[in-house]
Each structure stands twice: as C-alpha cells, then as structure tokens.
Amino acid sequence: MTGDRYLIVVPHGGTNGSWRERLTAIGRQHCLALTEGRSFLLLAPESALVFGGPARAHGAVLGPIYARGGRTALTDLPDDDAGAAPGARAASLIQRYWGDYVAIIDDGAGPTILRAPFGDLPCYLHRSSDATMLASDVALLESVSVEPAIDWHAVALQLIAPDIRRRRTCLANIEELACGERITLGPSPEYETMWSPWQYVGHEQRRDDRPAATERLRKVLLDTVAAQTSDGMPNLVLLSGGIDSSAVAAALSAAGCEAAALTMVTRDAAGDERAFARVVAGHCRFPLAEVVRDPAMVDLTRSEACDLPYPTETSFSQATRAAIRAHTGSSRHRILHGGGGDQIFCSMQSAAPLADLIRTNGFDRRIPALTLDLARLANATAGAVARQALARVISRRSAYRWPSNLECLTPMVCAQESEAVSHAWLSPPAGAGSGSAGHVALTLSALGIVQSPTRSTGQPWKAILLSQPVIETCLSIPPWLWFERGRNRAIARRAIEDLLPKGHVWRPGKGAMASFMIEIFDANRSRLRAMIGDGLLVREGLVDREACLKILDAPGPIKGNAWARLLQLADVEAWAASW
C-alpha cells in the first residue's frame, strides 16, 4: 500500500478513550502512527504534516502538497497557513498550494476536512452511532467494523452515467468527499464546495492571446510534472505516441527526470503505435518496451476495482498491468500516463467554440479559419458548422447535455436518468458560453481518471496531467484558442512542440484499441452469457437479461458498439461479485 494511507475518527461527544486503544492496535497492524487532535484521532504515516503539539494537534496535511510554482513537495507549511481559522486556511490551501492532499483543520469547535481539487488521495466517509470515520481506503474503514454492502441504486446511476463521480458511492453508507470539497463535522455535518471549474472560466477577452496562453500552459505543465516526480521513485511512462502521453514524456525529459517507457500494441494495425512511440522515446532518451496486447491475460470475472467503492476500472487494463509487472518485477515504480489530456486540453468536436467566439467578439476575423478547423475535425461542411454556431448564439443555450447510456437497462433503471446525469458543474452561470460549458463537462469526466486504481499494490498509477494548476490554466483559455491547423488541443501541442521531434505534435490522429476489446469479447462470449445472464445485475432488476442475450446470441460478427456495453456490464458484475 502506498505511504499516504490514513484513518480519521471523530468521536461523537468528544470521548476519545475507547477509540484510542482500538486505533493504537490498528496502527501497529498497518504501520501508522496515532495522533490525538483537539476533537479527532488520526492514524497516518509519521511523515504526515501535523500542526500543533503532539498532545493536542489542531490539524494535519496528509499526502503530498506543493507550493504554486514549486518543484518539490513541502515538508512544512508557513505559520499563517498552519494556524489560520478553518475557513481561511481551507481557502488558503486551495489558492496557494496544490497536490494530492487531504487536510484536517480543527479549531476546537469541530474538525473540517478538505480534499484537494483533483487530488489523487481519496477521502471516504462513514457515520456510525458513536463516530464519524474518514479514510483513504475502504479496507481501513473495515478495520473499525464498517461492513460494506452494495448500494444498488447508486450502481444503477453508475450504469447510466459512469463518468460522473458522485458523493454517493456504490457501497451503502460510504460517501466520498469530492475533490475541492470540505466537510465540517459537528452535530449537523456541513459540506461546502471550495473549488469549482467555473471560477476559472470566462474573462475571455482579457486572456484571448494564443502565445501568452501557450507560455502559461508550458510553464505550469513543466513545473507540475517536475514536482510530482521529484521524490526519486522510478517512473514508467505508458507511451502511446499520441499527444497526451507524448506531453508527459516531454515534460519528464525537460525536467531531467529518468524514466522508462512502455507501449501496448494491438494485433490490428489500427492500434499499433510503435512507430510513434519509438520516435518519442528515442527523442527523450527513454528505453522503450513494446508489448502486444493478449486477450488471454484478461479474466472478466476478476475486478480491477475490487478495493474501490465503485466499479470504475476495466478488465482490459489487466493486460497492461501484466506487462508492467513483467517489466518492473518486484521493484516499486510510479506508473505515469496521459489520461485526462483529451478532456482538459479541450478535445471536442462541436460548433460551440465558434459560438463562443462570435458571442464574445462579434464577427471576429478569426471566424473563417476556426470554422474550417472545426469542420475538418467533425468531418462536416463549413456551412453546417456555421449554422450550428449561429443557432447556439441566437438561442443563447449554454448548458451541456450529458450523454446517458440506457442500453440493456430495465425500465426501473431508465427512470433514474435525470438523477444520473445531474451534477453541479453542469449548471453554468449566467452568461457562460456553450463552448466553456463543454470544456467544463469534459473536465468533469476527467474526475474519474484522477484516482490511482491500484493503491493496494504500492505501484501507484498517476494521471500526471490532471493537476490543479494545469486544469485551472486550461479552463482559463478561451475555447476557440484550442483549435488550429484542423486539430484540437492546439495550445497543448504548441506548448510542447519544441520538446518533441519536429511535426510530431501535429499528427492528425491516434491509434485505437477497439480491436483488442473485440478480441476479448469474442473469446469470452460463453462466459459473458453466464456472468450477465445469471448475474447479480439481472437478479437485482438493473439489467435486461433478454436484451443482453439477444446481442450475445446474434449470428455473425457483432454489429455496432454493443460489445462495449456488454464488457462494461461484465466489469460492473465482477465488481459486485467481489463485494
């Protein structure tokens, strides 16, 4: 297990005595030190930043935290941040720092717990009759007699909109403190959103400068990648050759960080990116391992999310993990990938950025070029893009309509669609543009990528692009600046262009791994029939058994993308069975 595990217990009524003995025993078992606060008890590594004397601490920061612009993790905080009032200190942490931290702030009236915006370190919460418990993982909650049970209503919401992260997890009576949210514990616990993407969107006219936006993103990208890899742990980059993983490799190389690279290849040529991965790895001087994806390495009955309170991991990733184990052996590496780059670098195919440009600047001279760029991306005509943009301007509609997936679900589950696709970030403020709303929605979908899926292995996976400063910088860039030369993510491409081989960042496309998933599907038809047809999701009335079997039993090659839905259902089924 990684070294940032923690368990916080806030006894109701302030009686710590009985808890102290229990937590001391748990701490010995998990190699965690016990700290007693004014109104809380904390089990955490001895390296945790604790504020106040050892007898009665008044707060702590768990997990790595960095100063803005800094390139190493902090080992202490200034007195004004350590000693401020809870509300001021929480705001100060978000404004002046960033990282994968969870902070405890206790002024004696009741502790406040803050989770960092886009922080990798989770914060799961359970309330019992005698205490509120918060922990980095469900296993630590179980150690204090929390007995997880599946929340089938939450599972239904997950099936409809799996990319929306909710406070309600798929385990009953276990909540997750959201990124950028704080909870103040007392007689009536109070939640407060301390960070929202909408705080960084807008004011486009003041930031409408492509060279300045490029320089801002370049600096923050290089600073944050250097900071997150400054601890000396060996790094392994999952390198596809696409722009996002190439950005990770380029930033590592620029920071002088040693790393190795691994590229996964499909048997089908559409998913063979070896040529591009070799070019990037060679330029960065990273040794490259090349592994062909093998469906035999995938066991659909085993969940990669078995220690998480929601079924967010995919079975096909087992092949990548097997390749990593073969490459790293018993040594501990940090696995770095470019996940989330599409989202934060504004990889959209929509007329919305054009509508925002028109709404903000009127008939700007850049409109023809942007129209053509968006048309090339969407494989549409310039006229169609222009008409859609003008329709958005006239209607002034900005809210993003989140796509739901009702395929193979029962009517009982489909009736929950509106609840499943709701989230505070999807309600734009007055005057927001539809392009900005789309960028915020993309950023929301990246939340599910932030958390390392394998905390229990001690081999952390890191979506290293998804740091708070990078995301804030990306959101502050007007949507229309992200498109150039018929490509999206243009500011990110420009920011790293000189760090990679000439022309690489402007390559038109990227490989796909759909063929590998179809191989998995075809090799597991009979297993899928048993898993889904006789599984828990059908038993609980969530999945339409006949609809699934109709897809599986259809003669000939499977049509459309129905195979992807069935593999997704199998992932959820395996997760449910693991609990």
Image (spheres, helix red, strand yellow):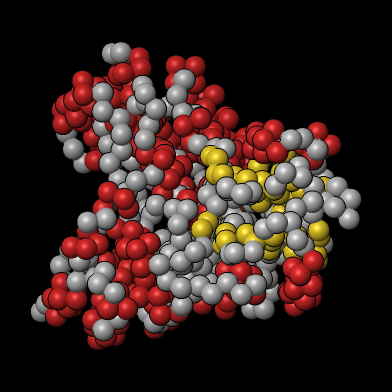
Front residue of 305/413: it is 413
User: Looking at the picture, how far across and down is residue 166, in whole percent?
Assistant: 44, 53
Q: How many marks?
A: 0
Res 296 quadrant in image: bottom left
User: Looking at the picture, how far across and down is residue 157, in whole percent?
Assistant: 33, 58
Outermost residue on the left side: it is: 555
In this picture, is 410 found above or below 147? above
Front residue of 196/34: it is 34
In this picture, is 249 found above or below 80? below
Front residue of 574/460: it is 574
Q: Residue at x 30, y 45 (%)?
A: 402
User: Looking at the picture, how far across and down is residue 386, in whole percent?
Assistant: 20, 26
Q: Residue at x 24, y 40 (%)?
A: 378
User: Looking at the picture, how far across and down is residue 240, in whole percent?
Assistant: 46, 58
Q: Residue at x 42, y 71 (%)?
A: 150
Decide if residue 409 is on the left or right side of residue 219: left
Res 273 quadrant in image: bottom left
Residue 297 visible to an observer of this rendering: yes
Q: Quadrant of the N terminus?
A: bottom right
Q: Residue at x 26, y 69 (%)?
A: 542
Residue 280 visible to an observer of this rendering: no
Front residue of 285/84: it is 84
Decide if residue 20 is on the left or right side of residue 302: right
In this picture, is 207 found above or below 137? above
